[in-house]
Amino acid sequence: MLLKIYNTEHESMGVVQAEKDARIESELYTGEKKLYFAIHQTRGNIPHEYYVQTDKDEFVVKENSQSSEGWRDITAVLNTEAIEGRIWKDFTAENCTAKEMADYALTDTGWTCISNIPESRIRSVSLKKVTAYAVVQKIMEAFTCEIKFDTLNKVVYLMDKIGADRGSYFIKGINLSELKDSGDSYDYATRIIPIGANGIGIEEANHGVPYLENHQYSSKVKTVIWEDSNYKDAHALKEDAEKKLEEISKPRRTVQAKIIDM
């Protein structure tokens, strides 16, 4: 993996080859990514807070430690410094689309937002003493969508679904070296009671019934209360409660794969 290196003033320091253990781990829900790689100390050093660019992203070095036989292990996170550095003492956006709300949150950061969330989906968010990054994460929750940070072009993507079929295959014996799967049902529930601002429920939008049910995995009844004071409309509260219940009414499954770079 070829990497471009920049110092803390964002001045180019040249290019290095990530010689060992190079990989990127990403979290689909939050949009966060981490870059891991190792270089031999004879190749130089990459200090903390330096910037590292791949062909798709820019990262900030957060860990630099010596390992065996002169190797240094580097860990870097996505460069969202401008968003994290924008402080909101009082952020309030009422009856806005996802893009309108995100554009407002990103004011003075140099970032913009691209969204495919329908304009008919209107939400309200109110937060105090938070960063623009925290606001964007809250917007993602409020619109029950997925998020992606384009750190090279300074764009926040808010999408119903980020994933896409890119024609890649993971085949054991060829490029798939290891596959692990795990799961849990700690957050499992089949019935949800949504509560919004001032204690409003979904009765108005749900034929007088204060809860929703989803038995896609089992017939057992396990109830959870979901409360979010940003919801002032029963129909919006019901819509997002349905999406949340769709996720938690089946066990969570995680798959980890190690891929050989062909």
Image (tube, rainbow, N blue to C red):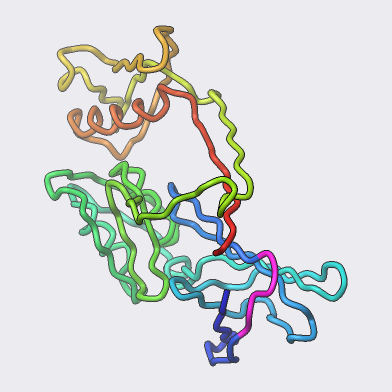
Q: Quadrant of residue 225?
A: top left
Q: Give the magenta part as a residue range.
A: 16-21
- At 51% from the left edge and 32% from the top edge, which residue is drawn? 253
In this picture, residue 162 sits left or right of residue 184: left
- At 34% from the left edge and 27% from the top edge, which residue is drawn? 246
| Whether residue 73 is situated above or below residue 139 in the rendered picture | below
| Whether residue 85 is situated above or below residue 124 in the rendered picture | below
Q: Nearer the viewer, residue 43 or 210?
A: 43
Q: Residue 198 at x, y = what percent?
A: 29, 29
Q: In which quarter of the image is residue 131?
A: bottom left
In this picture, residue 122 sits left or right of residue 199: left
Q: Residue 63 at x, y = what percent?
A: 70, 68
Locate the N terminus and report the quarter of the image it occupies.
bottom right
Locate the C terminus and report the quarter of the image it occupies.
bottom right
Q: Which residue lies furthest to the right in this view?
A: 69
Q: Residue 34 at x, y = what percent?
A: 57, 61
In this picture, residue 10 sits left or right of residue 96: right
Q: Which of 170 and 61 is in front in this view?
A: 170
- At 79% from the left edge and 86% from the top edge, which residue is drawn? 42
Q: Which of 185 and 4 is in front in this view?
A: 4
Task: Decide whether the magenta segment is chiefly helix, strand or loop.
Answer: strand
Q: Quadrant of residue 44?
A: bottom right
